[in-house]
Amino acid sequence: MTTAIAIDGISKMFRLYRERPTSLKQRLLVSRSRSEEFWALRDVSFDIAEGSSMGLVGHNGSGKTTLLKCIAGILRPTAGTIRYRGRLAALLELGAGFHPDLTGRENVYLNASFLGLSRRQTDRIYDDVVAFAELDDFMDNQVKFYSSGMLVRLGFAVAVHVDPEVLLIDEVLAVGDESFQRRCLDRIRRFQSEGRTIVLVTHALDVVRQVCDEAVMLDHGRVQAIGAPDDVVRTLRHRMLSDDPTFVPEEGSREVEISGVVLESDGGLRDTVHPGEGMTITVDLRADVAVPDAAVSFAVVSASSNLHVLEGKTSRLGVSLGHIDGKKRVRFRIPPAPWASGTYFVSVGLDSPDGRLFHVQTQHYPLTVPDVDDVPHALAVEPTVEVEDL
Amino acid sequence: MERTSEPPRLHVGARLRELIAHREVLVNLVRKELKVKYTASVLGAVWSLLNPVMFLAVFSLVVFVLDNNVPDFPVFLLSGLLAWNFLSNALQAGSRSVIDNANLVKKMAFPREILPLSAVGVALFDFVLQSVVLLVFIAVYPGHGFQLPELALYPVAIVTMLVFATALTFWAASLNVRYRDVGHLLNLALLVWFWATPIVYQGWLVQEKLQTVRFLGLDLWTLYLLNPVAVIVLGFQRALYSIVVPAPGEEPILPPMSLGTLAGLLFAVLAVSVLLLFLAWRSFFHRSGDFAEEL
């Protein structure tokens, strides 16, 4: 496995001026401008494998956008180096690098040169860009007469046609109308299938889980977690919940343990359920010492509203687990429900009839509900046929 | 690995290769500036020629009123004025080049030096255009023409002017990001500087008055020549105007120094300018890593 981007000990320091001298007078009169060092990134190191999709997540001010700008070459790291293989295109804002007084054609050439293309190389992709943007009749008009939709189309068309090996995408890309978002996501998937590397900064946890094969979580400029998107998303969630002092991610006496939890939709998808679809939550238990009885419970919590959208407990559902000695499996079947799209977290608990906690995992398992209107895709069904004599 | 991120210190060779790799951006930015400058105007690039013509008209009138008789005054004035215009255009546009392109700096990755360089490029375009017209003008000017050994100073003066202007433009552009009054300061400085340079008046007049006055052990004329632009302008005048003494026994127009002395002065200014360019570039490079954040 080759590395597309090697990030090695990156730190970025900004000077924060309490009274920022923006004029020479201030600079000269205020003897020494009072500034504080602010480290937006501290010793960040990780590799991004060629052909992988890496998600950068974190709260506001965690340094994820600063890191993306360092990778893009817009900001220069204070310390450390980033090594690259292949051409890199950054989509931090669509239509950036356009000049209103130039025509669409001239802007394509200007923008492509920023992304590293020569005039001749731009000549070769020009027709495809125009066709993709569907702007044939407007290429000789000044861009200031374009609608915002036309600008976005042209910007995106240039970025995807410069043939980058690595694509950096900021979450601002996620704004825009729904059909455009879908086209972006579609295009990202095509990039992935072509074996290109993608680095994505986003707030939308379900996007990370759907798109990325690896994720990095930053907090106060340091890497807090790196690994599978589900694990990183859980760490991020727990970090957020830890503002509440009563929050404990995992607790209990562990006489009986939760040894595995699987979320599966009726359609066979893991950790994902579509609106109107049923699903199963399977909880595996293991008792090290025999216990007379226990109750298993679960709760599904919405990440955006913190609302408990669904709860269930074996004892309340009239089921008894009975004597546990060794392993047991419990399946909660959830009938088709009008799930709202977004990210959810599932908590699972195990307690004794007298209320003693055996094992509780709070908001441990992420669950994604994708948007309803999916892009038209091939229907994987085999039609049957009947012929009737009339 | 094919590339690495920018190191914190300037490595001239590596950075130069980086700039050459991005020459397309420079070309496109110069093209953009020229287009924006001249597209929406009816006369287009003619405006670039009107400025020196108006200058010439005004100063011809002043010279006529003052009864200052410089033979072939248009050639004298324009040969120095075009160099000055280049410097002042490059500096004024260059000082704004980073802040005016804030949207590019914040969103696109490219060597930031390209921004002041494109301002120099635009000024150079105007300079070349005006110079071509001036050279034709001199060739057809009755009783004038080119003096061969003197003309050899022309390329030296041009190179010196380019290096010096680029160095100052780097400084002005990067300082202007932090201290926005660099622009105001620059306008004042340019006004003083223009009159401290023998463009409108003859160099000999200055030499005659100053060389007898001594200050700090140096005569004032030597101090006057510490102004690099004065030396550059004298070089241009000697190369194109070439009249040191109009006729035997008359007062000189240009300072009557030998061609070798002037060439030596020009090379000294060039050497200092190269050093300045290196220092200014290093300072610009150092600051440019945070431009995206400071704008």
Image (spheres, coloured by chain):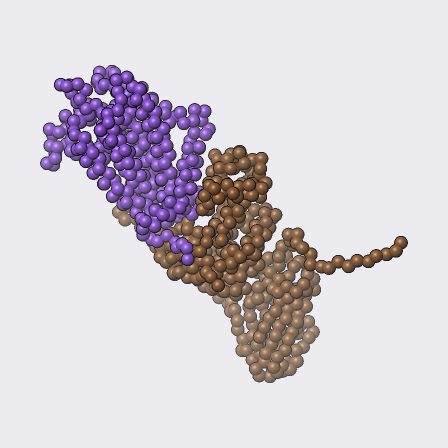
Quarter holding the C terminus of chain A is bottom right
- Is A76 in front, or is A28? A76
- Is A186 in front, or is B128? B128
Relative placement, left or right, of B129 versus A118 is: left
Q: Which residue is drawn at 44% across and 56% down?
A: A85
Relative placement, left or right, of B281 versus A288 is: left
Q: Quadrant of residue B70?
A: top left
Q: Position of residue A48 (x, y in %)?
A: 47, 60
As drawn, the chain in brown is A
| View extreme (front): residue | B148
Relative placement, left or right, of B257 versus B160 is: left
> Where A56 sits versus A173, above or below?
below
- Is B189 in front, or is A334? B189
Q: Where is residue A228 in the image (x, y as percent from the top left)?
A: 52, 64
Q: Which residue is drawn at 55% across and 54% down?
A: A191
Q: Which residue is drawn at 33% across and 35% down?
A: B90
Q: Residue at x 46, y 28 (%)?
A: B40
Relative placement, left or right, of A157 versus A378 is: left
- Please identify which colour was used for chain B in the image: purple
Q: Is residue A75 visible?
A: yes
> Where B70 sits versus A215, above or below?
above
- Is A246 in front, or is B73? B73
> Where B206 sits versus A307, above or below?
above
Q: Can residue B197 be seen in this view?
A: no
Q: Where is residue A49 in the image (x, y as percent from the top left)?
A: 48, 61
Q: Where is residue B218 in the image (x, y as percent from the top left)?
A: 12, 35
Counting labels gives 0
